[in-house]
Amino acid sequence: MAKKYKVLLIMVFTMILGYLPWYNFSAVSSFIQSDLSLTTAEMGTILSVFQAGYVLTVIFTGWLADRFGRKKIVSIATILTGLFSIMFSLLANGFESTLFFRILTGLSAGAIYAPGIALLTNWFDKKERGMAVGAYTAALTIAYAGGYFIASPIAAASGWRSGIFWTSVPALIAGFLLILFIEEKPKDTASPAIQKSSHPSEKIINKNFKNTVIAISIIAYAGHMWELYTFWGWIGSYLSSVIYLGGATQAEAVANGGRIAAYVILLGAPSVFIVSYMSDKLNKIKLIMAASLFSILGELAFGLMSSMNPAMVIAIALWVGFWAVADSGIYKVILTEYADTDKTATLLGVQSAVGFGATIISPYIFGRVLGSINKGLSMTIEYPNWGLPFMIVGIGALVSPLAMIYLSRVMGKDVK
């Protein structure tokens, strides 16, 4: 096996282990809310502040990764993610402490994904980059699903602290695997998408064109993330509520809701790999538009539902789960193709920061709107009304396909 594929396999495996703490909180949120007496607004704040921690660190660590080594940053960040998540499981006793440990976890996680992609771009040229980024993003998706799939049943059986703890320890293992088995390949000096020209005017045109493409890809990514992480962050609670109101006990509803949410998120793993792999051969803009519009239709369907029919809710959730993340890797592939190689991690950090900036706002708005239309009820598992927040998520996500329409006009014959 070529060395680059061994690197990819190890990176994929450590990503699965390293990002399990991301959604272990959402997987057991009903138990945490009940045990620590948190309001819906406080739960939304915790989700948003966790994303804020990611945003605060992702640009800075991208810059560090370009200058001091991508492997070093990814390894340290993975270890710290596991460490702070473990501390949360052992020490959190209220809103303030939960907020504190979750933001530390988010700060650490912010230094994993973008520098990891930048590391992979050192090993794969643009003809295989979609496949590599797709595999890495699929691993991220599996980790998110794993957080739900593992933490929920453990929490139902042994308490939420056990669920958090046992989905945090693997991140420590992942960090040491990265230190031991990953190495960096010397970076190329030429821009991966447009080679440098000796003619001054052509250099200016190329630079302006590349910057425009990168900027649009960043804006489109923000619309994508507005939808994706709010959907992932709240779908477990929504499904638990549907099941609970259908007659299940709280423990049964949380366990089954988390399990189904895990499958919903897990569907994104094959979809993001397949669509990213296709982007190596087909039109990237059209693939993004198709995936984003399909998922937005599902969000709008949630909003238009007149009743919480469990079978219908689960069917739509699976549909959105497949399409919502399918185009995630392509935004990054476009950026890496037009970014100078010595700035790749930094620009990926900017893209992630803008994207996750949207996720600071979106889940908070979702939580506030959800609470306001379900007044008189203290726990999300009891809420019967969820349509309006999902409508807001879908409408905001329209930024992505609209940006792609504009990008197709900018690129013209250069559309790939």
Image (cartoon, rainbow, N blue to C red):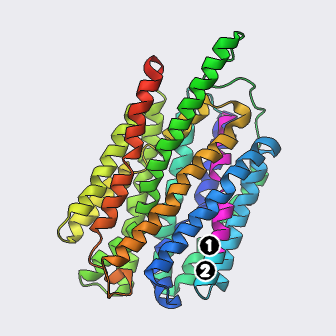
Q: Mark 2 and mark 1: span between their CA atoms?
A: 6 Å
Query: What amino acid is found at the position of numbered circle 1 in the picture?
Result: Arg
What main secondary structure does the magenta stretch of the protein show?
Answer: helix
Which residue bears the numbered disc 2? Answer: 98
Q: Helix or strand or loop: what does disc 1 sit on?
A: helix
Q: Residue 351 — which label?
A: none
Q: Nearer the viewer, residue 303 or 73?
A: 303
**Quarter containing the N terminus:** top right
Which residue bears the numbered disc 1? Answer: 102
Q: Nearer the viewer, residue 171 or 10?
A: 171
Q: Is residue 146 above or below residue 351?
A: below
Q: Nearer the viewer, residue 230 or 19?
A: 230
The residue depicted at 38 percent of the width and 39 percent of the height is: 402
The quarter of the displayed image where residue 275 is located: top left
Q: Is residue 201 above or below residue 340?
A: above
The residue depicted at 23 percent of the width and 70 percent of the height is: 310
The quarter of the displayed image where residue 171 is located: bottom right
Residue 249: percent from left, percent from top: 32, 87
Q: Residue furthest left?
A: 306
Q: Residue furthest top?
A: 199
Q: Dot 1 surroundings within 10 Å: few (below 14), some, or many (20 or more)?
A: many
The residue depicted at 57 percent of the width and 38 percent of the height is: 132
Residue 108: percent from left, percent from top: 69, 62
Q: Are marks 2 and 1 in contact (CB under 8 Å)?
A: yes
Query: What amino acid is found at the position of numbered circle 2 in the picture?
Result: Thr
Which residue range is magenta in the image?
Answer: 101-123
Relative placement, left or right, of 222 versus 204 is left
Residue 68: percent from left, percent from top: 82, 45
